[in-house]
Image: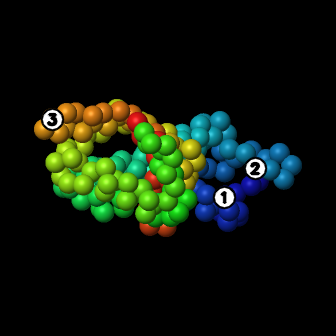
């Protein structure tokens, strides 16, 4: 008869999973080993928890980038606001004047359009939706609003985030 202690792979598996499995819980078919249905369902649930846990952590990291951008903007600090963007010539920003390529050109356009804190106003994001497109990419949709003394411009944005070694960065921004 098969014993779990005789098979180091199964023994290691039992230790990693964290619940007791006896040798009667395994079925053999040729050279393949199968878990009975009860444990199979527990494993499937565990896998879902792990996958969604990673997804939630990634979404949290992306929302943190947006929060840091909002804080920088509301402090009148465009330089720190730009830390949320990919610092590369391939960054794509699409605004009311059409596409702009490059981090530096995007920064220059922000500084030209918003030369002081009064023009920058107070930035608010709302209705943010994050859709993971894999482990290293995400799509974000939301609404923005600037609260200024004489007006309240607002609109929507779609962002594409990519995960780099130094964190999540916006690689494409379409704001109108």
Q: Residues within 10 Å of mark 3 (few under 14, many from 20)?
A: few
Residue 118: where, in percent of width, then height?
A: 16, 48
Callout 3 secondary element: loop
Residues at badges 2 and 1 in contact (C-beta under 8 Å)?
Answer: yes
Residue at the image position 68 percent from the left and 62 percent from the top? 9
Callout 2 secondary element: strand
Q: Which residue is mark 1?
A: 10
Q: Name the residue nearer the viewer: 70 or 97.
A: 97
Q: Residues within 10 Å of mark 2 (few under 14, many from 20)?
A: few
Nearest-to-viewer mark from 3 and 2: 3
Residue at the image position 66 percent from the left and 58 percent from the top? 10
Callout 1 secondary element: helix
Nearest-to-viewer mark from 3 and 1: 3
* The quarter of the displayed image where residue 72 is located: bottom left
Give the left or right position of residue 52, taking residue 65 as reference.
Answer: right
Q: Name the residue nearer the viewer: 6 or 127.
A: 127
Give the left or right position of residue 125, taking residue 76 as reference.
Answer: right
Residue 104: image tag: none
Residue 36: where, in percent of width, then height?
A: 67, 39
**Looking at the image, residue 153 lies above or below residue 107:** above
Residues at badges 3 and 2 in contact (C-beta under 8 Å)?
Answer: no
Between the C-alphas of marks 3 and 2, the distance is: 71 Å
Q: Which residue is mark 2?
A: 33
Going from N to C along the chain, the mark reached first, 3 or 1, is 1
Give the left or right position of residue 45, taking residue 74 as reference.
Answer: right
Going from N to C along the chain, the mark reached first, 3 or 2, is 2
Residue 109: where, in percent of width, then height?
A: 38, 54
Q: Which residue is mark 3?
A: 150
Residue at the image position 20 percent from the left and 44 percent from the top? 122
In the displayed image of the protein, which residue is found farthest to the left? 149
């Amino acid at each position: 008869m098969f014993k779990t202690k005789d098979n180091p792979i199964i023994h290691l598996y039992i230790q990693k999973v964290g619940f007791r499995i006896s040798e009667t819980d395994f079925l053999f078919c040729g050279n393949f080993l199968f878990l009975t249905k009860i444990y199979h369902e527990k494993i499937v649930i565990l896998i879902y928890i792990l996958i969604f846990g990673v997804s939630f952590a990634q979404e949290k990291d992306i929302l943190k980038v947006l929060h840091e951008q909002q804080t920088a903007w509301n402090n009148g600090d465009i330089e720190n606001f730009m830390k949320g963007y990919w610092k590369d010539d391939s960054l794509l920003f699409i605004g009311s004047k059409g596409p702009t390529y490059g981090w530096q050109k995007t920064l220059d356009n922000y500084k030209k359009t918003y030369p002081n804190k009064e023009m920058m106003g107070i930035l608010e994001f709302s209705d943010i939706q994050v859709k993971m497109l894999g482990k290293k990419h995400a799509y974000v949709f939301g609404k923005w609003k600037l609260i200024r003394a004489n007006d309240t411009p607002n609109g929507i944005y779609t962002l594409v985030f990519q995960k780099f070694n130094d964190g999540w960065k916006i690689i494409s921004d379409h704001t109108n």
